[in-house]
Structure formats: structure tokens, C-alpha cells
Image: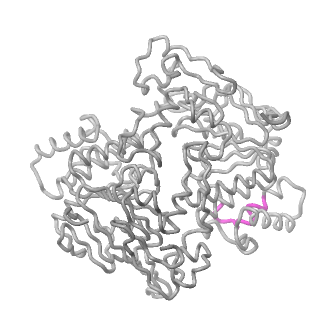
Amino acid sequence: MSSEKECEVLLEVKDLSVSFASDGGEVEALDRISFAIKKGKNLGLVGESGCGKSVSAFSIMRLLPKPTGNITHGEIRFGAKDLLSLSTDDMRKVRGNEIGMIFQEPMNALNPVQKIGDQVAEVFLLHQNVSKSQAWQLAVDALSEVGIPAAETRALDYPHQLSGGMRQRVVIAMALACTPKLIIADEPTTALDVTVQAQILDLLQVLQKKKGSSILLITHDLGVVAETCDEVCVMYAGRIVERASTQVLFENPVHAYTRGLLSSIPRMDGIPKKKLTTIPGIVPPLSQLNQGCRFAPRSGLPHPEDALLSRPPFREIQPGHWVEACPVCAVR
Amino acid sequence: MSGRKEVLKLDQLRVHFPVRGGVFRRAVGSCRAVDGVSLTIEKGQTFGLVGESGCGKSTLAKSIVGLVRPTSGSIYFKGKEVNPRSLTPDYRKSVQMVFQDPVESLNPRMTVGAIIEEPLLIHKVCSKHQRRQRVAKLLEQVGLAGNAADRYPFEFSGGQRQRIGVARALALEPELLLLDEPVSALDVSVQSQVLNLLMDLQSELNLTYFLIAHDLAVIRHISDVIAVMYLGKIVEVGYAADLYANPLHAYTKALLSSIPVPDPKVRKKRILIPGDVPSPINPPPGCAFGSRMNSPRYSMSVDQESKLEEVEPGHWVLACPCCVNL
């Protein structure tokens, strides 16, 4: 479709498993997930709360809480680097410099007792060989680039003096400060109003075009995914159940869970007051996961016993369209 | 609009909070959270209210149930004026509220049974034995197992907790239910379960809903009439179909255009609204939205008090010279 260079893989996650120590023993938050992001492209990671979206992001950044969270299996390749084998110092050079992260709650991601200008300048001081005054100037430029009016005076403000949308802009300025190759955006607009969400998504897209970065967008909002992503991974209970280009996934979802998710959102063009399709029950707790089809209890379809015992294979049913579904859950 | 029974009517309701400052904490200004809202809700209807955070939606709902005292204006319930300083027990029973956050609105130290029973105890409506039966019936109505009564809120998921909140609100057999963002804290699959429950209960019990939400698709799905609020004022009201098909106020248009559509083939043009909602403490003179949009006709609105005008039957819009082309 596009030229060779554009399709170069930037980040590849292979067979990644993460487990957490809890009172009831080890629980597996991610169960051998694999995905890849191409240069300059956007990948969306969608799913309900607790399905492992944020854990995936934290694993790539190697920010899992120690000692409870552990990567037990797998590989994360970023360009030529193997992120999991980097030393702590080397990893620190990657964070913020080559991979930027936008966190969900802008209030919690910012230091409340530091001026926003200083917080953005810190990124430059850490990763670029600049003086303090140069870093401050770069921070002011970064803030005006994300659309903060009167950035010179605003840089002296503390986070509490800004609105939610403005705070999220500061977090974006920090994440994009060193022109990272990859931006991980963990629910960047969930805490914001629709109008501000539209501003932020627009800003992200403009900046991405300008800098040529790739975005890993984690969200539960399928509307946001449809508008911003090239490719989508649908996660359920620690596994990726379906992966396809956005167009294909919305047009021809194969996994029963993807279908359920897509049909349960009220649509602007739907029939008012009509009963919404629901997925009965809730996401199973991590301590009660089986090895086989994990969607079986909520699918409403009778599953043969062997479907519950062995994990279905992750198959490519069409070029670029991957599905991990037991025969019962694969609707074709 | 005549002929049908009106349940709730607000007339020029205002809620202003004093802003205190100086050594003696005197009121130095006021925050106009709700600034002259008039609306009518009919029996059996779902009245949806949308707007950005900070526009006064929740304050409006709280002033209706009496959690916040209105500064001026009147509330009529079934044709009779309500005195906000001393709400009658009958009004308190008939108007109930479901809160946004199902985690924070349930007392973690009370069992679910005790939570649902509490309104019955306060209003002394029935005997102990009858109360038990009523709780069991309510749990069944909202789709929870009977043994839930002896368990604590933390044992339930978000969607189930919201069902508990709905059961508590239904305990006194209210006529009007105020739903303040009932599904915004829930995942999509659970959100649709709760919305279906609300629609079922409405037809079963002939309830009237006043629904606050910021998700415009949710509002459109279950509301009959929708009002759009901006900075303490209602800028547009109309039947759901009319409002979405033919939005008249510039703010409604921008709001509708900013919803992401879950269909990658749809590429629509967004109207981006710059900046944030202005502070209700120090609102700009004239039209608050026009000044945010830098509307060229903003200056026309400065010396003029805009009023809601009926454009087509049931479709009202705040006729401000810079935001509406009539």
C-alpha cells in the first residue's frame, strides 16, 4: 500500500506475559500478547477496564510496579534495541527521549509544587546537552507548540492554575519534547469533555504529522479509535483477541467479543429507545482465568469442554486480520 | 405541549454561590452556577441535559432535590409551587436522585440491604417485615440476586453498584428520578446493560427521568426532550430528533460535531471550540459562547439580554445575535 520505508516496524512486542503478585498468589495480567507498530502509524489498544491495556503500556516503558509486577515471558523490540535487556540507565535514556508517554490523569501526572515550565524543561535538561536557560526557552517553545496561549507567562503557573484541557496539553508537551519516535497515549482524553477531547485529538494528529512519530493509543472509546487509528488491537482478559486495520475491524469484526463491543455502544444514527445489545456479565477477575476461551461465560453460546481447556490459536484469517477465537466465538 | 401532565417545572431558577474573600470572609462576588433556568418536564418523559463540565448541570439537579438551595426562581411539582426552604415529605419521596459515582455514593460500612432500606426507615413507610420484602423486590427489579442484601458494596462491580444506587432511589416509589451521569463511570458493555435497565424500569413503573450526561449518543438514545446548557444557561431545548437534525445554536452545533463517531468511514468536519468554558465567577459581558468563539457579531450581544424563543413547536433556542441565525 505504501512505500517500503513507511512500513518499517518501530516497536514489536512478542509473546509478552506479565504477572502480578497478589494475596491469592500470582495472577497473570497479560498472557502472551504480540503486536507491532509501524513507523508513522497509529495503533489503538481497546478493551474494558482490567483487560491489560495499561499494563501493556507500562511494560513497554518498564514502569511496572516493583516488586509485584514482573515480565515473565516475551520480548519487546524497539528499533534495534531489546528494551527488556537494557540496563536501568540505558532505559532512562529511552524514556522521554525516544518513547514519550501521555498519562491518563493530567493532574496526577504533573508535580503540583513545580512550575509547569520547569517540569517541561526537565525533559530537555535530562536528554539534551543544554543549559538551564536554554532548556527554559525550549520549554516555552514546546508549550506554545501545544497551543498554550501566552506560553512565556503560563510557564510560570502551577498545574492547579490550569484547566483540565490545558494540563493535558502540558503533559503532551512533556511527552513530545524530545521528538520521540513513539508516543504512548494512555487514555489521553478520558478525563476531558467532548469539546476539549476534540481539541486534544486534533492537536495530537497535527503534531504527529509534523514530527513523524507513531502513536500507541490506549482507550476504551471506540469512536476515538475510529477517528485516529490505522490499526486496532482488541484486548480481552489479558489477551489480544482480534487485530486488524481500523476499516476492516469496524466493517467485519470476527470475534464475538469485538462484535458485542461494537454493537453495545449507542449510536448517533441508531433508533432511539431501542434496546441496546449487551454483553452479559462482567470481565472475569484475573484470579479466575481459564486457559481456553476466556469469553465463553459471557458469550451466551454453549462451549464444548475442550474449548475451555486449550487456548485458541492466533490466526491470520485475511492478510493483516488476526483473530484468536475458539470455533464457537468466531462468527464469520 | 398542552394536554399532557407536567411533573416538574422550573421558572427562572438561579443558584449563585458567594465567593468570599478578604479578612472577614465577606462575599466579594458570586459564582453563577445556574443562571435563570426555565424548563418543563412531562410525565413519563425522559428529559436529557447535556453540557460541558462546570456548566451547572449537577448544581441544577441538586437544587431540584434540595441538596443546594436556589437563590431565586421557583420550582413547581405537579402544578404546585415547592418551597425550597421546607420541602414537604411528599416531595422528598417523589423526587429521588441517582448519583454519578457508584463507588462514592454508597456507604462502604452498610450492607446493600441497609442502604436500600434506609429511605424506607427515614420516611417510616412500612413495618420491618414489609421493608425486607420491599428490599428483596427492589433487588429483583434491578437485576441483582436476593442474597445481595447481606453483602457490602465493595463486593460488587461498578455496574452492579450503579444498580444498587437505582434500587435505593426507587425504594420510595418516586415519580421523578434525577440521574446524574448514571453511566459515565462504566465500561461500554456494562453501560448498555444499565441503560437497558433504566428504559425497562421507566416503562414498567411509568417513571419520569431527568437525565444528565455528557455523552451525546447516550442522551440521544434514551431522551425524548434534550436541553443543552452552557455556563449556567440553557441555550437550546427541543425534541431529541429535532435538536440533532436541526441544531440552531452555534454551541449545540459545535458540541454535536465534536463527538467521535465509531465508524472509520465517516470523516466529518469538526467545529473546534477554542479554549475552555469561561469561569462563572466572572463571566464575559453578553454572550459567553460568542466571546469564546471570537464571533464577529459578539459585540451585538453585549448590551442585550437574550431570551429563549420558540422556533418550531417544542424547539426553543436562546436567541443570541452572535450564535444563532434566525
Of residues B115 and B294, the one nearer the viewer is: B294
**Colouring convention used in this rendered image of the protein:** one colour
In the displayed structure, A329 sits above or below B217; it is above
How many dots with numbers?
Answer: 0
Of residues A108 and A181, the one nearer the viewer is: A181
In the displayed structure, B103 sits above or below B292; it is above
The quarter of the picture where the N terminus of chain B appears is bottom left
Q: Answer with left or right where residue A147 lies relative to residue B211.
A: right
Asked where in the image residue A176 lies, by quadrant, the reply is: bottom right
Question: Residue at coordinates 44% horizontally, 84% vertically from top-left?
Answer: B305
Q: Answer with left or right where residue A120 lies relative to residue B114.
A: right
Q: Is residue B214 visible?
A: yes
Asked where in the image residue A43 lies, by quadrant, the reply is: top right
Of residues B263 and B163, the one nearer the viewer is: B263
The question of residue A303 being in magenta is answered with no
Question: Residue at coordinates 73% horizontally, 55% vertically from top-left?
Answer: A206
Question: Residue A97, position in %: x, y?
Answer: 81, 49
In the displayed structure, A245 sits above or below B54; it is above
Question: Residue at coordinates 31% horizontally, 46% vertically from top-left?
Answer: B199
The question of residue A119 being in magenta is answered with yes
Q: Is residue A78 visible?
A: no
Q: Answer with left or right where residue A288 lies relative to residue B122.
A: right
Question: Residue B266, position in %: x, y?
Answer: 59, 46
Asked where in the image residue A62 lies, by quadrant, the reply is: top right
Stretch in magenta = A111-122
Question: Residue B189, position in %: x, y?
Answer: 45, 38
